[in-house]
Image (spheres, rainbow, N blue to C red):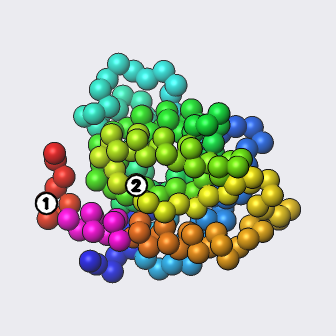
Amino acid sequence: MTDTPLNTAVLVGSTRENRFAPNPAAWFVDHAKQRDDLALDVIDLAETPLPTVQQAHPVYTGHYPSPDVRAFASRIAAADAFVVAAAEYNHSFPAPLKLAIDSVHPEWRAKPVGFVSYGGLAGGLRSVEQLRLVFAELHAVTMRDTVSFPNYWKEFDADGNPTNPDGVAAAATTMLNQLVWWGTTLRDAKRDHPYDV
């Protein structure tokens, strides 16, 4: 293990008009900033242009014709770990998030992914379970523990703060402890043994 902070990209995965995503994402980022073992890069997909029709070029090689995709890929490549703030839409995750994930490929490999989710009764966990399948295909490791906000409209006050701050802070700390362990371990391992399988 090293003392170098883990470069962690936080993806805000909803682009819907009047979306709620900035609330849990901002709270999580503020919580994560209290740690000295993380260096954060917030990637808000609402502010990240990606082509919905991509050119006929295999993403598996890491060569991207679109300059917007190349810019996105460079930020994903620079990250040692990821946290995805995911809404649940129709028992799944938002289409723009799938577009972003599918826009690049090798940049995700052998890196850990944590989740902050929100939704109705299930707290967005159905979107998380589907995201686990997607990231497994990309050779990414998903964290077992998550941060979730069921019935999210009741979980935040008018100022955007959680109404149960201790509970979600404890969940975030648990998830981030896992993320840092996996991220640091994989980063150090890849330095000595590149992941090329």
For badge 1, the amino acid type reads His
Left or right of 191, for residue 141: right
> Which residue lies under the disc numbered 2?
142
Residue situated furthest front in the rendering:
121
Mark 1 or mark 2, whichever is nearer to me: 2
For badge 2, the amino acid type reads Thr
Residue 183 within the segment the image draws in magenta:
yes
Residue at 58% x, 37% y: name it: 92
Residue at 40% x, 54% y: name it: 142
Left or right of 54, for residue 119: right
Q: Which residues are magenta?
A: 181-189
> Which residue lies under the disc numbered 1?
193
Examine the image and state in which quarter residue 170 appears.
Answer: bottom right
Q: Where in the figure is residue 2, as x and y percent of width and height?
A: 28, 78
Q: Main secondary structure of the magenta part?
A: helix
Examine the image and state in which quarter residue 65 appears.
Answer: top left
Dot label at residue 85: none
